[in-house]
Image (cartoon, grey):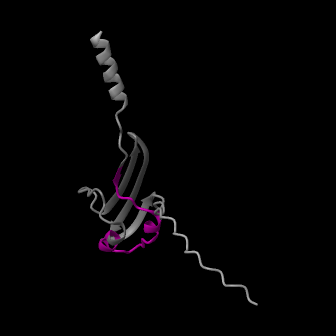
Amino acid sequence: MRIPALILIAVLAAACVHKIDIEQGNYVTQDLVDRLKPGMTKAQVKMILGTPLLNDIFHTNRWDYYFDNAKGGKRIGHKHLMLVFKDDKLESWTGDANPPPPAPVRAAAEPEPATKAAPPAK
């Protein structure tokens, strides 16, 4: 009788495992991509997009910005932006960007204090 009870407890405990949300990579939005211009230096691109997630030693003239999103252990999004440089100047870029992040939630403004009404004119 004890073994079936232990198995039942183990199964119920396994069902209660919480899987965290995971975001990895560079969150590059379309407004950042819109700021890119051909001919920019690598330093200028880094100021806008940040450092790429991976540095590929076989493609030194290509930067890859990856972003993965997983909720509850299931992959729900993947974005990849590839930039190509020629003579250390930005030549072209392809890929997709993330939507802008949601606006921060602000506390409701406190109501203005009530003012006394002026007495009626005679």
**Residue that lies at the very extreme toward the top in this rendered image:** 1
**Residue that lies at the very extreme toward the left in this rendered image:** 57
Is 114 left, or right, of 57 in this rendering? right
| Residue 97 position within the rendered picture, expressed as x and y whole percent measured from the top left | 45, 59
**Residue that lies at the very extreme toward the right in this rendered image:** 122
Up-down relation of residue 114 to residue 6 (above or below): below
| Residue 112 position within the rendered picture, expressed as x and y whole percent measured from the top left | 55, 74
| Residue 61 position within the rendered picture, expressed as x and y whole percent measured from the top left | 30, 63
Q: Is residue 39 magenta?
A: yes
Task: Depth check: give the residue in front, 83 or 15.
Answer: 15
| Residue 86 position within the rendered picture, expressed as x and y whole percent measured from the top left | 33, 68
Task: Depth check: give the residue in front, 97 or 104.
Answer: 104
Residue at left 35%, top 43%? 20
Task: Depth check: give the residue in front, 86 or 44.
Answer: 44
Residue at left 36%, top 74%? 40
Quarter placement of the N terminus? top left
**Which residues make up the magenta segment?**
23-46
Residue at left 44%, top 72%? 35
Up-down relation of residue 110 to residue 25 (above or below): below
Quarter placement of the C terminus? bottom right
In the rendered picture of this protein, how many numbered marks are placed on residues? 0
Up-down relation of residue 28 to residue 116 (above or below): above
